[in-house]
Amino acid sequence: MHQVEKHIEFFKETLGVSYVLTDANDLQTFGRDWTTLFDACPTAVLLPANTDEVSRLLKYCHEHSLPVVPSGGRTGLAGGAVASQGEYVLSLSRMNKILSINTKAMYISVEAGVTTQMVQEEAARNGVFFALDLAAKGSSQIGGNISTNAGGLKLIRYGGMREQVLGLEVVLADGRVLDLNTPLRKNNTGYDLKHLFIGAEGTLGVITRATLKLMPQPRFFQSAILGVASVPHIMEIMSLSGQHGLQISAYEFFTDAAHKIVCQMHPQKRPLFTEAYPYYVLLEIENHQEDRSAFESFLGEVLEKGFAKDAVIAMSSREFKELWGYRELITESLASYGHVYKNDISVAVGELPAFLDDISPIMQEEGKNDITFILFGHVGDGNIHINYIAPKKGGSYKDFVIKAKAAEQRIFKVLQSYRGSVSAEHGIGLIKTADLKYSRTAEEIAIMQSIRRIFDPKDILNPGKIFKL
Ligand code: 2HG
Ligand code: ZN
């Protein structure tokens, strides 16, 4: 029997025939994430039902040196879940149970395949709150969120995924199960190994279970979108909110070009203001008590001082959703517009205005090469998404990416001088392996390689992702 057939036979015996997929459509679906740069080419998709099955699969793959791509909701934007080299995709989507929720000790315990939204809804049903919020929450899975240390829309208030994790269960490359899954809030007994797996993009182990923090449910939300003339004004508004004692839970921005494309692709979305402004800021305040006056007096001062030119305030939960739509629809609108290439960078929050000034001549020059730059993102965290776009009729995607990458390298050199990050939240995956050097020193990369060798000496877990061994 051919080697591959022997492996498939073993997987079918272990999981049951229905849970080993080799059909061309399934391979295409499970072999890619939301990036479009790579071809999907896995050998098979494996769908274990529990930790024991994951352990048996990995033990076998380790013994036979078979490459494995751990796979969550595949909403990633860095190619971290792409299987383009005949790998075996290990999808945790059948492991989607909420295991327990404790509203006194404020934690929820789940299997890795539950979606972010399922956790949010289970928390809300129990009168508490799970703080991670992402535009992709309906599909993104907790295991993937942890493996990529997802950031999202409320990081400014609650931190990213790392801050939500209390405990983890992880299956190592050779099948050993590492049980770090306690709800302890404090534990200073040596190295806290769970942190190694958070943001490791599936290269150090496969996360099978997690215990996550819960928070009291905020009851009152207020939000507004402001039309703003300059980036320094965006920063002034943020610091003024602090002076008014407001607890900001989201501070997002987008340029007029982003706004125009959302309105173009979604005709039901009318332009926000009669006049166009260079930037729009979406800010959200969460409160446990209703207090409209503080928000209103803050907005009054923002307008009076000229930091914003105009404001639209959500007066109901329908309007609140409506306002968020202008921000959350950007990624999808760009994808339906044409060719897209993405950056996901950060600098220290206070350095954003200077950084954007420094890269503005690059964007202007490169704009002459038929690239339009769309800026948006989590400005309150210093995390900017730069999307390079062009209409499809202008040429092939491949040629467009070559041009976009040339522009990107110029931007990354400036970023390096700010000691910024080439990936603030999406990760390195396959897309940014050559760019890791802009944000990490040779010593750091060497140490990361040594750690990876300890956990995965045969390099079977997500080989080639983040860096090569
Ligand atoms: C977001 O903030 C996501 O909406 C996607 O991180 C960003 O499309 C992007 O570049
Ligand atoms: Zn983002």
Image (spheres, rainbow, N blue to C red):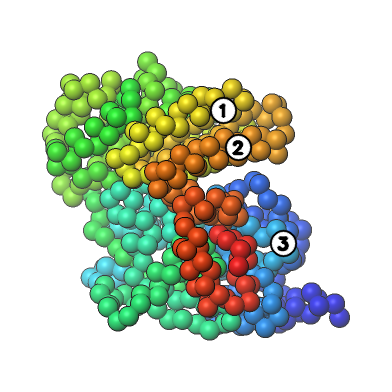
* Residue under numbered circle 2: 406
On-image quarter of the C terminus? bottom right
Secondary structure, mark 2, is helix
Q: Residue at x 43, y 59 (%)?
A: 149
Q: Can the viewer see residue 337 in this picture?
A: no
Characterize the local packing of mark 3: few (<14), some (14-19) or many (20 or more) Cα atoms within 10 angstroms.
some
Q: Amino acid at mark 3?
A: Gln
Q: Is mark 3 within 8 Å of ligand 1?
A: no
Instruction: Spot the residue most to the right.
Output: 1
Expressed as whole percent of the image width and height from the top left, the position of residue 313 reads 27, 29
Query: Looking at the rendering, which quadrant does residue 131 occupy?
Result: bottom left
- Foreground pick, 235 / 20: 235
Instruction: Spot the residue most to the top.
Output: 275
What mark, if any, has residue 302 been given in the picture?
A: none
Q: Given contact means CB atoms under 8 Å apart, are the residues at marks 1 and 2 in contact?
A: yes
Q: CA distance from mark 1 to mark 3?
A: 34 Å
Query: Looking at the rendering, which quadrant does residue 194 occupy?
Result: bottom left
Q: Which of labels 3 and 2 is toward the front?
A: 2
Q: Amino acid at mark 2?
A: Ala
* Badge 1 or badge 3: first in the primary sequence: 3
Expressed as whole percent of the image width and height from the top left, the position of residue 79 reads 60, 54
Secondary structure, mark 3, is loop
What mark, if any, has residue 366 been given in the picture?
A: 1
Secondary structure, mark 1, is helix
What mark, if any, has residue 85 been given in the picture?
A: 3
Is residue 56 shown above or below 156? below
